[in-house]
Amino acid sequence: MLKKTMKALVYRGPNRYGLEDVPTPQITDQNDAIGRVTLAAICTSDIHLVRGHIPNVSVPKTVGHEFCAEIVEIGSSVKRLKPGTRCVVRPAASCGTCKMCQSGMPALCEKYGIFGLGQLEGAQAEYVLIPQADRVCDPIPPGLKEEDVILVPDMLATGWFGVKNAEVNSEKTIAVVGVGPVGMSACLIAKTIFGAKKVIAIDVLSERLDILLKNHVVDIVINSGSQNVSRIIQDITNGVGVDAAIESGGIESTFELAAEITKMGGIVSTVAVFSKPLMIPMEKMFAKNLTVKMGVHRGEGISDMIGKIQEGQLDARFMLTHKKPLNDVLEGYDIFGHQKDGCVKWVITPYQTNSGT
């Protein structure tokens, strides 16, 4: 039997959040499961949330939608899972019947939605309620660890979404503008799965560019803080521009740069979460016949990517630069949120009691 309360990171309003004791979740529907969170991660959208950039979030709210869990309890209708099953959990739960689900947008499900953002409590906690567990949970294959797969349902799936929107193939040269975790994921997916002819990474943080080169994820890196990006892109592409740019910065300067370096008739694919409105240079984009694609990913490619990881063909662990228990989650929000200490991704291990259990 689970204990009555647990530790969780709770958001109570802009810049008001902390580790609290909250009631441990209970099964309320026959399709529910309760998971013991075995590994979680801080997402950039979590940073936006606690800073008050995401409107209409009910408070108090337990934060977090990137996580793995060990199933500890199941409802009577759960068939694919059993207590002890280790899973990587998709960032959103869906009912399958509301208008958003029927429109192919399960992340915006009117009944459930994204863990820690929609109607559901999040997973930066000791335990989490997982509705529609058979649909939401992907069992971790034998031989793989949580670290191997935790980035698949959100970071890598977002990268997949951006790369697919960019129509990447073996004949395309692409640039990724902004290489935080999602941008790095886009580089990785473009190179290892979609087989891009050439992948160019652009960022102001040299340590992130170095990580990508060290792990053979990209062909060329450009530091936009110290180098003339447009001139270098012109040289690389013989004056044409890249076939597509994947933009993940979510600010005017990165969006404008993505449009600037893309060739006539090319694609700008943005995978950013925008925290404020942008002024977009439509007159320049119009003259180049650019196509702009954006949106929320639909979980495409998750099973394929887990299979590639199992086969040793896909490895995103290089992004997991920092790891500490839930006890230290506020330190994680500071370091990851302010891009300190070369942090690419902060992952959260289970809460440790004084006895270390």
Image: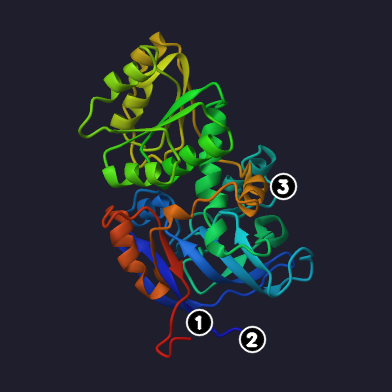
Q: Residue at the spot x=39%, y=17% of the render? A: 237
Q: Residue at the spot x=39%, y=43% of the render? A: 212
Reply above or below: 346 against 180: below
Q: As drawn, which residue projects farthest toward the left?
A: 226
Kindly state the secondary structure of the residue where label 3 is placed: loop
Q: Nearer the viewer, residue 175 or 258?
A: 175
Crowdedness of circle 2 by 10 Å Cα count: few (<14), some, many (20+)?
few
Sequence order check, earlier mark of 3 and 2: 2
Q: Residue at the spot x=44%, y=41% of the render? A: 216
> Is 282 placed left or right of 204 in the picture?
right
Q: How many marks?
A: 3
Q: Which residue is the site of mark 1?
A: 5
Kindly state the secondary structure of the residue where label 2 is placed: loop
Crowdedness of circle 1 by 10 Å Cα count: few (<14), some, many (20+)?
some
Residue 97 marker: 3
Q: Which residue is the site of mark 2?
A: 1
Give residue 132's position: percent from left, percent from top. Answer: 69, 59
Tag 2: amino acid? Met
